[in-house]
Image (cartoon, rainbow, N blue to C red):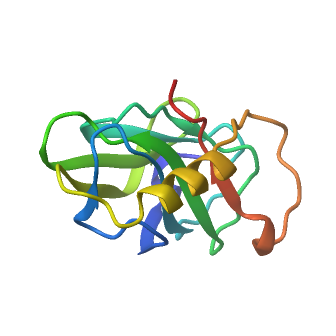
């Protein structure tokens, strides 16, 4: 398949809406819902990559399952709010295993410096959902199985 058949469309923020207040060093997991709106299957090994702004201690997420055209998937990345105060943004984009970027760029934007009303809930969610994914052979999956999570930052 060529890069032209791969496409990703942003659907929604599942959690951490724009300008969520965070405390310095707060651990959280950002989840976006996206759709494979191209004509090619996203193979296991495709990567959801940091492409700009502040990585907030995160790393690329590697898909461990294939995603069929028309399917939606939740992509989750464990992050840590930086120690500097202000509005912080992290931009992300999907790529093939070979590194060819495609589709919409998505982002998380937080405000660091105030007290967070959901710090404990966010940290608990991050700890419960932060598991490493690795590339495996593509398998048949149902839409209900489409969730990917990146490893927690160290």
Answer yes or no: is residue 42 visible. Answer: no
How many numbered discs sit on the rendered protein?
Answer: 0
Residue at 34% across / 70% down in the picture? 17
Residue occupying the far right of the picture: 140
Quarter of the image where one finds residue 16 = bottom left
Position above or below: 75 against 94:
below
Position above or below: 73 against 133:
below
Query: In the displayed structure, does residue 86 sit left or right of residue 71?
Result: left
The x and y percentages for residue 117 are 35, 67
Query: In the displayed structure, does residue 117 sit left or right of residue 114?
Result: right
The x and y percentages for residue 98 are 54, 29
Position above or below: 21 against 97:
below
Residue at 88% across / 52% down in the picture? 139
Residue at 48% across / 47% down in the picture? 3
The x and y percentages for residue 130 are 63, 44
Taking depth in this image into account, of 16 and 115 the one nearest to the observer is 115
Quarter of the image where one finds residue 39 = bottom right
């Amino acid at each position: 398949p060529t890069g032209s058949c791969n496409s990703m469309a942003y659907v929604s923020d599942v959690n951490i809406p724009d300008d969520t207040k965070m405390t310095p060093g707060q651990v959280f997991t950002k989840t976006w819902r996206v759709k494979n709106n191209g004509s090619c299957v996203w193979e296991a090994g495709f990567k959801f990559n940091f492409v700009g702004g502040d990585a907030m201690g995160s790393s690329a997420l590697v898909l461990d399952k294939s995603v069929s055209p028309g399917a939606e998937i939740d992509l989750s990345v464990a992050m840590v709010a930086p120690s500097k105060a202000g509005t912080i943004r992290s931009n992300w984009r999907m790529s093939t295993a070979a590194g060819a970027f495609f589709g919409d760029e998505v982002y998380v934007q937080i405000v660091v410096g105030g007290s967070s009303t959901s710090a404990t809930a966010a940290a608990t969610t991050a700890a419960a959902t932060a598991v490493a994914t690795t590339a495996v052979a593509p398998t048949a999956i149902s839409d209900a199985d489409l969730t990917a999570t990146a490893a927690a930052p160290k």
